[in-house]
Amino acid sequence: MLIWFLPLFLLFLMIGLPVFFGLIAAPGILLWLSGQSSDITLLYRNVYNGMNSFPLMAIPFFMLAGELMNKGGITLRLVEFSQALMGHLRGGLAHVNVLSSMLFAGLSGSAVADTSALGSMLIPAMEKQGYTRRFAAAITAASSVIGPIIPPSGIMIIYAYVMGESVAALFLAGIVPGVLVGVGLMLVIKLMADKYDFPIATRKKTWGERGQASLKAFFPLMTPVIIMGGILAGVFTPTEAAAVAVAYALFIGFFVLRTLTISEVPEVLSRAALTSAVVLLLVGAAMAFKTVVSLSYAPQILADFILSLSENPLILLFLINLLLFIVGMFLDAGPAIIILGPILGPIFVSLGVDPVHFAIIMSVNLTVGLATPPMGLVLFVASSVSGERVETISKAILPFLAVEILVIFLITFIPEISLTVPRLTGFVEWP
């Protein structure tokens, strides 16, 4: 009977129940109907146990660092730097949107923070230059998925926590795929710019002006260097690196740029706490949900079913990508990783797929799901920021989603894309 927990959970999602309550209610109801009252106690205790983890403390710290940098005007400096480099191109502000997302990814690791921070600035600016509001919202949502791919990444911290992988290895493995997504989006923008005669944002900047923009953006751009450098050098753990990022953001905001005031700190703390609470509650609920998954023998049933489809790992990887893409349409990336990672990961590792490679396949696929209708979280954030309907943004985002899906398959079938950097740094062994 417990095997019905997943259909019941999907039913709850379809009727509009929030994901957190669906993750708790579906298994809880079935355990109650099965007379397993002791397991109900275990289920709800695991909500707390799922959040009570030192590695997961990195998530609220990175959220706070992103909020501090956004409030301190650092996001604006990144946009100005991007505009100095690419504003003269046709479709310049669209290119700036993507490049800014790639740079902002190194600060917060959050797609939602990216959409909110950059969208509030760039969507009105793009509309003023003649872009349709739906296009501006669509490219903002599409580029924001780069946030959790380029390190630091909250989703990869969750994957490493659940699967026992190295956070540093996953961070390194995400660099090239994240850049590849950004380059792919820029190629689509170029094709559309030539076809629809997109406007040029600014005149071509001189090297002196670009140098000035680079100096303004220097301290923000040092954030990912400090984070990754400290982790790779063994100076601090990823959680400690997140705390260092917060301290660095405070230092820049108060003493270097002097754009942050004491009176603004409570609001920043409140926003970061709210965002972190949502993520951590989902993680806790997903860990509790995972308990019932194991009790129902669903992993063994699904593993047997997957292995019965084919013995060819490439065909199975193709099918799993389709499954993950569908899951990403309805379920947030964090809970999906916690629920499906322990089921799918061991299957593909046993077939010879490198565990870090599979982690990137899963993380990137589910991250793209954040921008996929009907339940993509960043679509709703982009809708809130722009005032456009989700349905309208969903149509405009389709060309960008097509490129991101292509990148997913490139990552899947060319392991070197994600594994070369961690291999060169010694975090993944050479075959």
Image: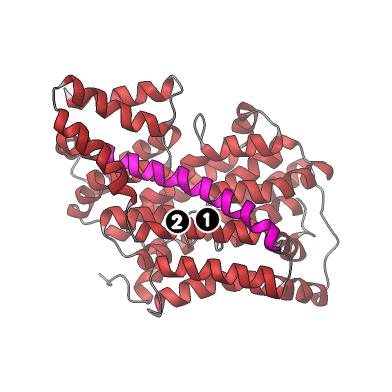
Q: Which residue is mark 2?
A: 59
Residue 17 vs 273, above or below: the answer is: above
Of residues 243 and 137, the one nearer the viewer is 243
Quadrant, the N terminus: top left
What's the residue type where badge 1 is placed? Answer: Met
Q: Which residue is mark 1?
A: 63
Which residue lies at the image location 70% right of the left edge and 44% below the top edge?
192
Q: Within 10 angstroms of label 2, few (less than 14), some, or many (20 or more) residues? A: many
Q: What secondary structure prevails in the magenta region?
A: helix
Residue 254 placement, left or right of 298: right
Q: Residue 32 lies in what quarter of the image? A: top left
Q: Is residue 381 visible?
A: yes
Q: Position of residue 364 (x, y in %)?
A: 43, 50
User: Is residue 263 rendered magenta in the image?
Assistant: yes
Q: Position of residue 237 (x, y in %)?
A: 38, 71
Q: What is the magenta range?
A: 261-288
Q: How many numbered marks are there?
A: 2
- State the CA–CA distance, disc 1 to disc 2: 6 Å
**Is there a contact, CB below 8 Å, between mark 1 and mark 2?**
yes
What's the residue type where badge 2 is placed? Answer: Ile
